[in-house]
């Protein structure tokens, strides 16, 4: 019965809540069936809210406190195969502890939705935000989204089930939220009604792939070299196909709920006629916006492009908006040791996205805010200064620069 | 709690259901006792079941694409995930049935694992599964006493001294596996006092085996069965002796057959007869000398082996089951 749920969300309201609470509310609105938890900061705040929603009878689900992240992700994987709508999540080393389960969830095309509360990979003891945890799934068949506000967290969660559970997609979906800056900070969020959500989000139907005695299929038999390439290609097609589904769902979301950016994939800020464009993900956009506003007031042509979907990566959209600019500065809250140009992960994706352009802009990389270190307005100024120099001289002396590091 | 199946105890071996749920298509070794365990398990459970199996011989040798032997719905789970697979499956059924998203009816949930996937890697997930009274599920651990699928490596359930590809006898170290076999079923029973049914089993005793499966599936809540499965490849013997070796494991007292039901320990079959003193245990050498994996053992090694088995029957608080005893009063 979902009467308590319908009652709780009978009228649309505004609430002062954190990104974690916003996603917990989305779980209730989406009538999730099986949710698994394991404590690790900072994502676990979402599970505190989920457990309370269950305790108060608003969310009717199996809420299982697993004995490890590995089990947490295995449990929802199997529940999803039986046809249950699922949710779980983790952070940092916890996400890595679950990695075996995470890889096969995508391989089995199971539409699990997970929240990643981005966190540094521990040793030497660091629990602040860093994006390397979530980014580790980039090659595995997970859709991966970076959130900037609590409102966006709620909205994308509702869309996540819809997109992941589309039978043409059937891929897991990770919602990345910067630790502390998003998981714990509160903002005003529009909470929709249960009615609205029901209209927008149909029930999960696993169809002919449902594991049930009425449908006695064998899931994940050994295919080996005989069939694996065909199956990998199907997963690839699902990821490619997700692009259209994301667009469709995003449009429907905008009509149903009356909000959302024009593009589901990227957010443009002061991009008109911008010669220098900064690119980043997550809550980084806050200090960047402040700095950019000041620069614009001073007549500098700078803009900001926030990448929302990291998978599928919106290469077409990005090429379109960056085809005219002179230089791009990619700010990574992550790093890829030993990679080309010793750069960050987003930087590499951006450079490979821009490579086919006829007029390639300079692409510079900035490593900032690791382990939760704050990225300040003056850091952004410094970044833009470096890029400006490249534009002025027409050469890039140093491709990657670490920002705000002690001498 | 979701509905439980109506699976009455089977009276007489001739009444074991003829209907098969695990048929042709598998590629297990000739004489593979674990294959028989699969077959008996699903005969007992019947078609209204979901089976999940962790990586190991019973996945790799069984479930080739296009030739699955499973007539019932079957899904692979990761090596250490039998507990989580059972929990996730049962949780989904319970939630969806309660909310009217699925027809409310009894469906058996069975997850199996090998000794490596279960008693080593998957122990914490199994332990967690056995704490969830609200889910009806059975975890069946088929114990062939090695990581068999990866070419027979020693596991925490391998017998002391056994030759394996990770514990080969050498000129300096004759015995490379110095660990004594884990006492898994009692460990789980002691650790999960709310769990209503934990049993040991052996495919050589087919009727006993099928009835244990049925008890586990009808008592309610999470349950666990640990079966000992002779493995011709890993134990190194002629495949035709699988059944006989299973019986010898029991008759020598090395393997004890029992059920722990609602806190009560019930010895079964030959183990019961031995405990009552009606029949003597056969010497363990009769069992060890039939298997190539013990060929390098000296007489002294065999004596040590025998003394450890004697100890389990003579000194343990509950012979063959509970390996400690209360402190003796002065
Ligand atoms: C996480 C992980 N580690 C290692 C393996 C390799 N592996 C596949 S089957 C297997 C043996 C499992 O042994 P057991 O559970 O006893 O089953 P058996 O093969 O003996 O039937 C191993 C180690 C794996 N599949 N997954
Ligand atoms: S190695 Fe042992 S368990 Fe594996 S298929 Fe062969 S006999 Fe069965
Ligand atoms: Mg084994």
Image (spheres, rainbow, N blue to C red):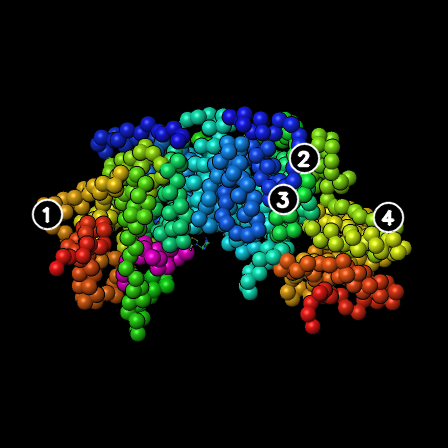
Please state which of the two labelled residues, at mark 2 or mark 4, is closer to the viewer. Answer: 2
When asked about the image quadrant of residue A16, the answer is top right
Q: Is residue B53 left or right of residue B202?
A: right
Count of numbered marks: 4
The stretch of residues the image draws in magenta is: B145-161
Dot 2 falls on a residue whose secondary structure is strand
Dot 4 falls on a residue whose secondary structure is loop
The residue depicted at 77 percent of the width and 61 percent of the height is: A378
Q: Position of residue B68 (x, y in %)?
A: 44, 40
> Label 3, label 1: how many angstroms apart (C-alpha)?
68 Å
Q: Position of residue A91 (x, y in %)?
A: 56, 52
Q: Residue furthest bottom?
A: B172
Q: Return the chain for callout 1.
A: B
Please state which of the two labelled residues, at mark 3 or mark 1, is closer to the viewer. Answer: 3
N-terminal of the pair, mark 4 or mark 3, is 3
Q: Is mark 3 within 8 Å of ligand 1?
A: no
Dot 3 alpha-carbon crowd within 10 angstroms: few under 14, some 14 to 19, many 20 or more: many
Q: Is residue A138 left or right of residue A71?
A: right
Residue B148 sits inside the magenta stretch: yes
Residue position for label 4: A272
N-terminal of the pair, mark 2 or mark 4, is 2
> Label 1, label 2: how many angstroms apart (C-alpha)?
76 Å
Q: Which mark is residue A18?
A: 3
The residue depicted at 28 percent of the width and 53 percent of the height is: B183
The answer to whether residue A202 of the structure is visible from this angle is no
> Label 2, label 3: how many angstroms apart (C-alpha)?
12 Å
Residue position for label 2: A14
For the residues tagged 4 and 3, is the chain the same?
Answer: yes
Dot 1 falls on a residue whose secondary structure is loop
Q: Return the chain for callout 2.
A: A
């Amino acid at each position: 019965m979902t009467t308590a749920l319908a009652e709780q969300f009978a009228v649309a309201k505004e609430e002062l809540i954190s990104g974690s609470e916003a996603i917990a509310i989305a779980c209730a609105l989406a009538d999730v069936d099986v949710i698994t938890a394991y404590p690790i900061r900072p994502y676990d705040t979402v599970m505190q809210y989920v457990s309370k929603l269950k305790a108060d009878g608003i969310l009717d689900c199996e809420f299982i406190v697993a004995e490890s992240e590995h089990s947490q992700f295995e449990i929802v994987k199997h529940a999803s195969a039986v046809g249950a709508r699922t949710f779980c999540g983790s952070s940092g080393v916890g996400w890595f502890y679950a990695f075996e389960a995470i890889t096969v969830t995508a391989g089995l095309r199971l539409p699990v939705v997970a929240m990643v509360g981005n966190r540094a990979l521990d040793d030497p003891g660091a629990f602040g935000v860093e994006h390397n945890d979530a980014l580790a799934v980039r090659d595995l068949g997970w859709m991966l989204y970076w959130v900037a506000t609590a409102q966006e967290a709620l909205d994308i969660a509702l869309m996540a089930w819809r997109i992941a559970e589309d039978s043409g997609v059937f891929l897991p979906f990770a919602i990345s939220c910067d630790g502390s800056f998003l998981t714990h900070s509160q903002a005003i969020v529009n909470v929709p009604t249960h009615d609205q959500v029901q209209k927008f989000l149909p029930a999960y139907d696993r169809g002919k792939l449902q594991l049930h005695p009425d449908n006695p299929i064998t899931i994940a038999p050994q295919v080996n070299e005989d069939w694996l390439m065909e199956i990998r290609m199907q997963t690839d097609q699902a990821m490619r196909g997700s692009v259209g589904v994301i667009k469709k769902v995003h449009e429907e979301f905008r009509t149903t709920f009356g909000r959302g950016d024009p593009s589901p994939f990227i957010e443009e800020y002061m991009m008109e006629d911008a010669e220098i464009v900064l690119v980043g993900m997550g809550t980084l956009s806050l200090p960047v916006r402040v700095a950019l506003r000041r620069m614009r007031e001073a007549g500098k042509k700078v803009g900001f492009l926030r990448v929302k979907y990291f998978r599928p990566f919106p290469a077409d959209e990005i090429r379109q908006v960056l085809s005219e600019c002179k230089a791009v500065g990619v700010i990574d809250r992550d790093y890829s040791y030993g990679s080309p140009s010793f750069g960050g992960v987003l930087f590499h994706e951006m450079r490979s996205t821009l490579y086919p352009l006829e007029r390639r802009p300079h692409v510079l990389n900035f490593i900032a805010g690791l382990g939760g270190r704050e990225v300040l307005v003056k850091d952004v100024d410094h970044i833009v200064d470096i890029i400006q120099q490249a534009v002025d001289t027409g050469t890039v002396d140093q491709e990657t620069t670490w920002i705000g590091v002690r001498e | 709690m979701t509905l439980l199946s109506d699976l009455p105890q089977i009276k007489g071996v001739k009444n074991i259901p003829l209907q098969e749920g695990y048929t042709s298509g598998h590629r297990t070794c000739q004489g593979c006792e674990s294959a028989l365990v699969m077959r008996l398990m699903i005969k007992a459970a019947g078609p209204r079941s979901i089976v999940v199996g962790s990586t190991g011989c019973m996945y790799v040798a069984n479930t080739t694409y296009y030739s699955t032997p499973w007539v019932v719905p079957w899904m692979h789970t990761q090596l250490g995930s039998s507990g989580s697979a059972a929990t996730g499956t049962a949780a989904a059924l319970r939630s969806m049935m309660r909310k009217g998203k699925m027809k409310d009816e009894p469906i058996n949930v069975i997850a199996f694992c090998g000794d490596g996937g279960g008693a080593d890697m998957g122990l914490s997930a199994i332990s967690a599964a056995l704490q969830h009274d609200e889910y009806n599920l059975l975890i069946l651990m088929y114990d062939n006493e090695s990581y068999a699928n990866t070419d027979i490596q020693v596991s925490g359930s391998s017998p002391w001294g056994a030759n394996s590809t990770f514990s080969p006898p050498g000129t300096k170290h004759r015995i490379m596996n110095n660990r004594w076999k884990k006492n898994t079923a009692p460990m789980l029973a002691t650790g999960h006092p709310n769990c209503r049914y934990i049993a040991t089993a052996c495919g050589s005793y087919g009727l006993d085996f099928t009835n244990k499966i049925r008890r586990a599936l009808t008592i309610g809540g999470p349950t666990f069965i640990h079966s000992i499965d002779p493995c011709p490849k890993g134990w190194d013997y002629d495949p035709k002796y699988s059944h006989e070796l299973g019986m010898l494991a029991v008759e020598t007292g090395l393997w004890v057959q029992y059920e722990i039901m609602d806190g009560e320990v019930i010895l079964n079959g030959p183990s019961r007869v031995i405990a009552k003193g009606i029949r003597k245990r056969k010497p363990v050498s009769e069992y060890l000398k039939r298997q190539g994996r013990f060929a390098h053992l000296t007489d002294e090694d065999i004596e040590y082996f025998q003394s450890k088995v004697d100890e389990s029957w003579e000194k343990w608080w509950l012979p063959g089951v509970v390996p400690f005893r209360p402190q003796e009063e002065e």
